[in-house]
Amino acid sequence: MNKNQLKMMHYGTTIDKVMKDTEAQQEVLSPLFEALRSAIDAGTEQAFDAETYTETKTAFTAGTAVYASLSDKLAALAAPARLMGNHVLLKNTYADFVAGCQAMTASLGDAPADLDVAAFNSAEAAQDEATDKLMKYLQRISALV
């Protein structure tokens, strides 16, 4: 393999690993999110179990740190020349996703009564928008590889 082929292979492998690690983290956090989302939708977030709430906040904090680390990997990754534009869009959008995760974690106060529902909903919308864009940029990159 020549140097460009090796760079493309390394790039593809790293992108694949980052996305798989992201999905694995989402699988851990999703049940916690869904429980909290259900309570918010039902208007019962004030009565959410305090211990579960604390576990959720701790897991969200740890998960956001994992996402931030993955974002750093994307930022440090050298993209092949023909993927540079899409890579910049991908890494910036992943950073937006991380910011949404940080905002969601910040919306969780110390207790269920301290939950900022408006900030939580806004953060969820930001994450959803970033996720949609991530999928678009990943498809573009896949088509060029």
Image: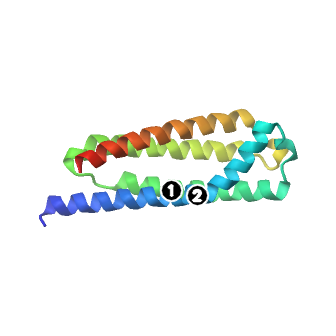
Q: How is the image coloured?
A: rainbow
The residue type indicated by label 1 comes to: Glu
Identify the residue at horizontal 69%, vertical 48% (top origin).
34
**Whether residue 65 is visible:** no
Give the alpha-carbon distance from disc 1 to disc 2, as whole Å. Answer: 6 Å
Element type where label 1 sits in the image: helix
Q: Are marks 1 and 2 in contact (CB under 8 Å)?
A: yes
Q: Position of residue 103 (x, y in %)?
A: 62, 42
Quick check: 134 left or right of 66? left
Quick check: 24 left or right of 137? right
Farthest right residue? 47
The residue indicated by pointer 1 is 23
Q: Position of residue 47 (x, y in %)?
A: 87, 46
Q: Nearer the viewer, residue 122 or 141?
A: 141
Identify the residue at horizontal 61%, vertical 60% (top origin).
28
Q: Is residue 39 above or below residue 32?
A: above
* Other-residue count near label 1 (Cα within 10 Å), few / some / many at <14 / 14–19 / ≥20: few
Identify the residue at horizontal 49%, vertical 42% (top origin).
131
